[in-house]
Image: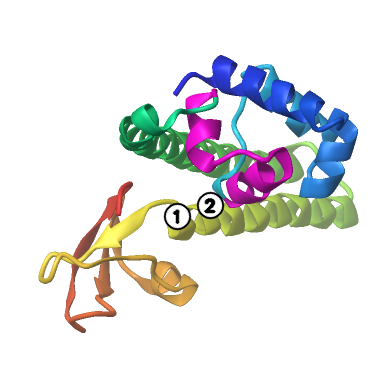
Amino acid sequence: MNLKETGAFIAKCRKEKGLTQEKLAEKLFVSEKAVSKWECGKGFPDTSLIIPLCDILGITANELLSGKKLTAEDYKQNAENNLVALKDLQEKSAKHLLALEWVIGGMATIFYMLSIFSAACFVENLAWRIVLICLGFVALFIAVGFCLHIERNVGFYECTHCHHKYIPTYKAVIWSMHRGRTRYMKCPKCGKYSWNKKSLSQ
């Protein structure tokens, strides 16, 4: 899948339907900037938007991923190639989000430590010390919540007993012991506890 070709195809189909970027964005409940990024080949619609976008443009999902109108002969081959390309794109996106999780967590921890250090060493007024420490704590709390959301929703955990892949509950993620991307959790299928490893593909 070539993002530039797909973007040019989206733009071509949009114009054929007599739609502006703004009108297409309104129909999909996204920003005009998002549509512009797709058409410039700098991004790709979220998987939840593929079918609605295709319906609006009068094309199939296979044609969208191929970046061109398809004949009956090359439809099947393109479908297989596009499934592989889409899976690869999703895995790359998941890897970026998981890397972002470490960055957000690290920066929030540093900010929290700096707020405590600053309050202790540079601020004499007790009220301002409390405010500074509270700001650091709130930033850390928000960052941890965001990181937990990424940890739960990006990829799957695989049971070492039955090899079932699943998305755990927030409760399981919060209370489970973990070693990096591996967590000690109960498999919802076989009911056994084990060290379940993160997997990016189903």
The residue at which mark 1 appears reads as 151
Asked where in the image residue 165 lies, by quadrant, the reply is bottom left
| Residue 149 makes an appearance in the image | yes
Question: The disc labelled 1 sits on which kind of residue?
Answer: Glu
Task: Give me the disc on residue 48.
Answer: none
Q: Residues within 10 Å of mark 1 (few under 14, many from 20)?
A: many
Q: Position of residue 5 (x, y in %)?
A: 56, 16
Q: Position of residue 46 (x, y in %)?
A: 59, 43
Label 1, secondary structure: give it. helix
| Residue 123 makes an appearance in the image | no
Q: Position of residue 139 (x, y in %)?
A: 70, 50
Question: The disc labelled 2 sits on which kind of residue?
Answer: Cys
Foreground residue, 134 or 116?
134
Residue shown at 89% from the left, 34% from the top: 22
Residue shown at 82% from the left, 40% from the top: 25
Residue 50 lies in the magenta-colored region: yes
* Left-right relation of 44 to 192: right
Residue 142 lies in the magenta-colored region: no
Label 2, secondary structure: give it. helix
Q: Please state the total of marks drawn on the protein image.
A: 2
> What secondary structure do most residues of the magenta stretch adopt?
helix
Q: Are marks 2 and 1 in contact (CB under 8 Å)?
A: yes
Vertical placement of 162 versus 197: above or below? below
Residue shown at 58% from the left, 15% from the top: 4
Task: Give me the disc on residue 147.
Answer: 2
- Residue range (magenta): 48-68
Foreground residue, 180 or 2?
2
Vertical placement of 69 versus 184: above or below? above
Asked where in the image residue 195 lies, by quadrant, the reply is bottom left
